[in-house]
Amino acid sequence: MSFARFLSKRILQGILVIWGVVTVVFLLRYLTPGNPVSFIAPLDAGPELRARIAAELGLNQPIYVQYWNYLTGVVQGDFGQSYIVAKGLPVSEVVFGRLPATVEMAVAASVVAIVLSIPLGVISATNRHEPSDYFATTFSLVGISTPNFWLGIMLVLVMAIQLEQFASGLPWPVSMVGMLSPPTSGMARYQGSPVLFYDGLRYLLSGNLQPMVRWFQHMALPAITLGTYFTALITRLTRSGMLDELGQSYVQALRAKGLPETRTRYRHVLKNTLIPIITVLGLQLGTLIGGAVITESVFDWPGLGTLLIDAINRRDWTVIQGSLIVIGCGFVLINILVDALYAYVNPQVVND
């Protein structure tokens, strides 16, 4: 099978999965208790007003008509209109407005994990039963066992409040921590506007370092919180994969031919170890995008996770559906990219 045919097959399977996600998300609204009209209509709304709202939502039509209208709307990028969380705004505008912040946090967490975990796993495997190996295994055990919400709170208390080295995402005074407070944004801001990595890089290229420094101060703690479990998992995978590969006969043959040990480890052993790690990296990146809800809540991060929680609490079904579909599409897209990368690294996958 050629690579193009392999990729086309994966894309077709991805489209079927997305169709399944849209169908399940549509049906969920009818499986949960409560009438969406009750959350939109005023408390003193009469039957006529309720019937008019139901007609605007299309709830008075047969379910197969509603499903077809919703499916065709999603295909055209129309997720409906937000009636509660962002009154009057299109859901696509609300969801895609929050998506960059979540993707940025997930990518930053992945970068932290990759930069730390792979070298740590290699060092641990090549120095077995030595202090560096014990440190790596202990770190991975602690990282996997530590809940994200607890780690995030501890980092805020120690690094942001006590040591004042990083931003906490809590722009009100420290004395107000724990009190009810108005919703705020934990993102870095410069001249009143949110600063993403792209904005900081643009300012940096023009000679202004301050926005990039602010971005780093706000991003460091959320990225560490979200990436710690990921780091520990990849460290373990790298260590076990390296140990398995180092015991293979081809490694002994390379050493017998006089190939330098460093080249044997990094060019041959690590390359073969990376194949399963790439799969886990892709799956975990999708998990980070969809599972950053707790971290976003701890750091008041204005991403897709906090939007989804807000929409669930206020029963804004159109926003809930739009958020879930976008997260599902993100999973599918990342898996297709991982499959393509996996086939590039290991061409035998294409013929399996």
Image: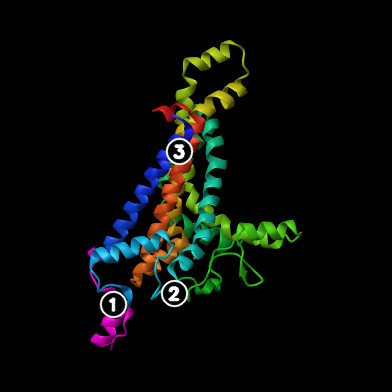
Sequence order check, earlier mark of 1 and 3: 3
Q: Earlier in the sequence, mark 3 or mark 2?
A: 3
Residue closer to the observer: 351 or 194: 351
Classify 20 as above or below 233: below
Given this view, does label 3 or label 2 mark the residue nearer the observer? 3
Segment colored magenta: 30-54
Q: Do tag 3 and tag 2 residues touch (Cβ < 8 Å)?
A: no
Q: Residue at x 36, y 63 (%)?
A: 321
The part of the image, by quadrant, that contains residue 81 is bottom left
Can residue 50 be found in the magenta stretch?
A: yes
Task: Identify the amino acid type marked 1.
Answer: Ala
Residue contact at pointers 2 and 1, CB within 8 angstroms: no
Q: Which mark is residue 86?
A: 2
Three-letter code, disc 2: Ala
In this figure, which colouring scheme has been used for the structure? rainbow
Looking at the rendering, in which quadrant would you find the C terminus?
A: top left
Q: Residues within 10 Å of mark 3 (few under 14, many from 20)?
A: some
Q: Position of residue 169 (x, y in %)?
A: 54, 65
Determine the secondary structure under disc 1: helix
Separation (CA) of disc 1 from disc 3: 43 Å
Please state the horizontal and vertical placement of residue 190, each as a whole percent of the image: 65, 68
Give the left or right position of residue 183, taking residue 47 as reference: right
Q: Horizontally, is 345 left or right of 33 in the view? A: right
Q: Residues within 10 Å of mark 2 (few under 14, many from 20)?
A: some
User: To which residue does mark 3 refer?
Assistant: 7
Q: Amino acid at mark 3?
A: Leu
Residue 229: in magenta span = no
Residue picked out by circle 1: 54
